[in-house]
Image (tube, rainbow, N blue to C red):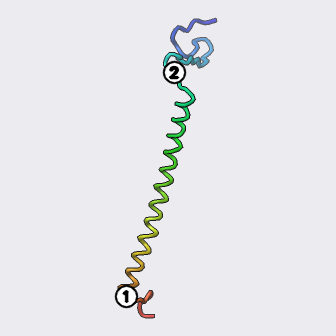
Amino acid sequence: MTENGNRTICSNCGYFMYRVANQNIEKRSNAKRALDDAKIAGKGFWKIFRIVWIALVIIVMSFWILALLIWLTGGEVIPGL
């Protein structure tokens, strides 16, 4: 057995050794985990909602622009036909 001290790689075989420092891990309750999961899910919801909202605004604005153009041309969708 080789003594490695504080190194994370064995000086004899090159094996990567990792120890989790338990003192730095935050103890979370199930309620805290559920709240964190809800925040993550909420971020995804708002991202999708924003995309849908932008698409809806583009569709509505296109309709109104088309209606304005039809009104300005006197009802002719394609002028001259």
Position of residue 60 relative to residue 71, above or below, is above
Q: In the rendered structure, which amino acid carries the disc numbered 1?
A: Thr
- Element class at badge 1: loop
Question: Going 52% across and 13% down the picture, which residue do you hit?
Answer: 7
Q: Percent position (x, y) of residue 50?
A: 46, 55
Residue hosting label 2: 25
View extreme (bottom): residue: 81
Question: Going 38% across and 90% down the picture, which residue do you hit?
Answer: 74
Find out whether the residues at labels 2 and 1 contact each other: C-beta distance under 8 Å: no
Cα gap from disc 2 to disc 1, whole angstroms: 69 Å
Question: Going 49% across and 54% down the picture, which residue do you hit?
Answer: 49
- Occupied quadrant, residue 79: bottom left
Q: Percent position (x, y) of residue 70?
A: 40, 84
View extreme (front): residue: 31
- Element class at badge 2: loop
Q: Which mark is residue 73?
A: 1
- 72 sits left or right of 47 in the view: left
Residue 37 or residue 16, whichever sits in front: 37
Mark 1 nearby-residue class (10 Å; few <14, some 14–19, many ≥20):
few
- 36 sits left or right of 57 in the view: right
Q: In the rendered structure, which amino acid carries the disc numbered 2?
A: Ile
- 22 sits left or right of 65 in the view: right
Q: Percent position (x, y) of residue 11?
A: 57, 12
Question: Going 51% across and 21% down the picture, which residue do you hit?
Answer: 25
- 2 or 1: tag closer to the N-terminus: 2
